[in-house]
Amino acid sequence: MSNQGRVTSSSQLNSVIFKDAASEPAFRRFFTLFPGLGYAAAYKVLQRVYKYGGQPFVRDYLAKNHGSTFDSTFGKSTGKTMMHATAGSLIGIGEIVLLPLDVLKIKRQTNPEAFRGRGILRIIGDEGFGLYRGWGWTAARNAPGSFALFGGSAAAKQYLFQLQDYNKASWFQNFVASIAGSSASLVVSAPLDVVKTRIQNRNFEIKESGTKIVANMMRHEGPSAFFKGLVPKLLMTGPKLTFSFWLAQTLIPAFNKVF
């Protein structure tokens, strides 16, 4: 997503992936694929807990206070699916609270020179709210992405398996629904995800707006630039998102029965 040129050969692909380590032995190149692991782990754990744990509360609030509005607007079956999707979208927007961890993760992975030997406390002290740069684009990316994640899953349960109570879905049904939701989420959020990543991987002192990045992408790379990295993301992030979402959809109802 950060690469602004076209990859036309295996050697060029090797340089894009491994950067300065492209000429190193294979085992050394392998370990360069894990920069920012600590930031990534902290961000993903907090993000998953917040998103999967928070969406049911927002959904229950919407069902209690606005359920009739969804039913009258979209119909009973579609209204239920839309309510799940809307709850996911709202909780996705709130993810910008965790944006600093996402920024540090992306910079460590794509632009480690931006750290200049500084630790996390020094960076927080130096940059402050600058770590929230690009929050608007992040919210714009999260809203449709989370809408598609929870909406795609709910649609699969509603129309594919004809479930009236989504919490009664079997492990297999949750797995299929998770594949539908995660795939839809990654595809829908891809264009704005590219813009968000390019905002966040700049050096801290470079303040290039998202609008300018979009204009440059259209001018120099064309519309296909907005889907750069989609295939690797579907192959790498897709299974992880599917697995975590599958577990959450299966275990949360089970815990509710126990506790």
Image (cartoon, rainbow, N blue to C red):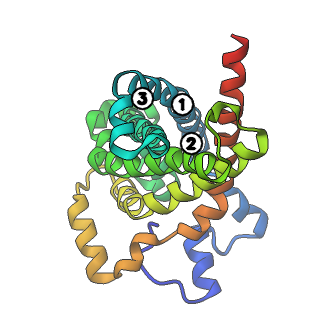
Q: Amino acid at mark 3?
A: Leu
**The label number, if any, that marks residue 195 in the structure image:** none
Camera-side residue of 78 and 4: 78
Circle count: 3
Residue corresponding to mark 2: 40
73 relative to 176 in the view: left or right: left
Camera-side residue of 220 and 63: 63
Q: Amino acid at mark 1?
A: Leu
Residue corresponding to mark 3: 121
- Residue 206 lies, in percent from the top left, at 26, 56
Q: Is residue 220 visible?
A: yes
Q: Amino acid at mark 2?
A: Ala
Q: Secondary structure at mark 3?
A: helix
Residues under labels 2 and 3: Cα distance? 17 Å
Corner quadrant of residue 166: top right
Q: Reading the chain from its start, which is encountered first: label 2 or label 3? A: 2
151 relative to 22 in the view: left or right: left
Residues tagged 2 and 1 counted as in contact (Cβ below 8 A)? no
Residues tagged 2 and 3 counted as in contact (Cβ below 8 A)? no
What residue is at 65 percent from the left and 53 percent from the top? Answer: 160
Residue corresponding to mark 1: 46
User: From the viewer's perspective, is residue 30 above or below residue 56?
Assistant: below
- Residue 89 lies, in percent from the top left, at 40, 41
41 relative to 170 in the view: left or right: left
Q: Reading the chain from its start, which is encountered first: label 3 or label 1? A: 1
Q: Reading the chain from its start, which is encountered first: label 2 or label 1? A: 2
Corner quadrant of residue 244: top right
